Image: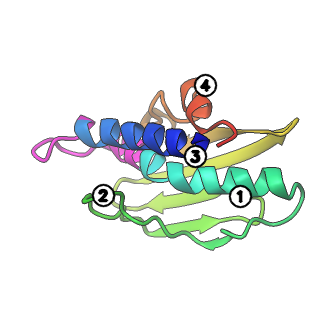
Amino acid sequence: MLMHTMRMRATVLMAAFAAACSPVAEVTPRHYVGLVVGHSSPLKIEIAKALIASPGKPVLQAGPLQLPPPFSLAPMKFDFGWVTAGGAIMIQSTKFAVIVLQEPMLDQGKVTWSCIVHPAEAKPSLCGSDYQNGLLQNK
């Protein structure tokens, strides 16, 4: 039941990101980063579970980044994507001239995520926010 609730929240979050970018609206670097954060939510949940289950061990998701498209949305396009052994998600897009690093931190059995974006003005407020961490917490 808890997993179902988290998936529903992630679905709502991704729908909000998708709705924010209408097909006729130009996708800005900030919008792109918001989409990356939304599309990577299911992966972050899986990484958090792995970190909680086996602290200090490499996550199974480590390696080239694979972000399956949610529902009928187009897959995220990026030039470089990687998941580190510690669970950090790195994405680079030359089209939008951004680098996104989402890094998990395990503390007392809870995982929170920091979000670093270059250039800084492309960072949406949701990226690494308490609200986002609340949605992803212990799921």
Q: Which sits earlier in the primary sequence, circle 3 or circle 1? A: 3
Q: Nearer the viewer, mark 1 or mark 2?
A: 2
In the image, residue 3 sits, relative to residue 60, either above or below, namely above
Q: Are marks 4 and 3 in contact (CB under 8 Å)?
A: no
What numbered label is drawn on residue 87? 1
Q: Which sits earlier in the primary sequence, circle 2 or circle 3? A: 3
- Give the left or right position of residue 27, taking residue 64 as reference: left
Where's residue 127, x and y in %? 52, 35
At label 1, the amino acid type is Gly
- Give the left or right position of residue 114, taking residue 20 as reference: right
How far apart in space, not on screen, are marks 2 and 4 (Cα)?
A: 26 Å
Q: Which residues are magenta?
A: 20-35
At label 3, the amino acid type is Met
Which quadrant, please, contains the N terminus? top right
Along the line of sight, which residue is nearer the eye, 97 or 138? 138
How far apart in space, not on screen, are marks 1 and 2 (Cα)?
A: 24 Å
From this viewpoint, is residue 18 visible? yes
Q: Which sits earlier in the primary sequence, circle 2 or circle 4? A: 2
Where's residue 37, x and y in %? 47, 45
Category of crowding for the residue at label 4, using alpha-carbon neighbours closer than 10 angstroms: few (below 14), some (14–19), many (at least 20): some
Label 2 residue SS: loop
Q: Which residue is mark 2?
A: 71
Residue depicted at x 76% and y 66%: 85
What numbered label is drawn on residue 130? 4
How far apart in space, not on screen, are marks 2 and 3 (Cα)?
A: 18 Å
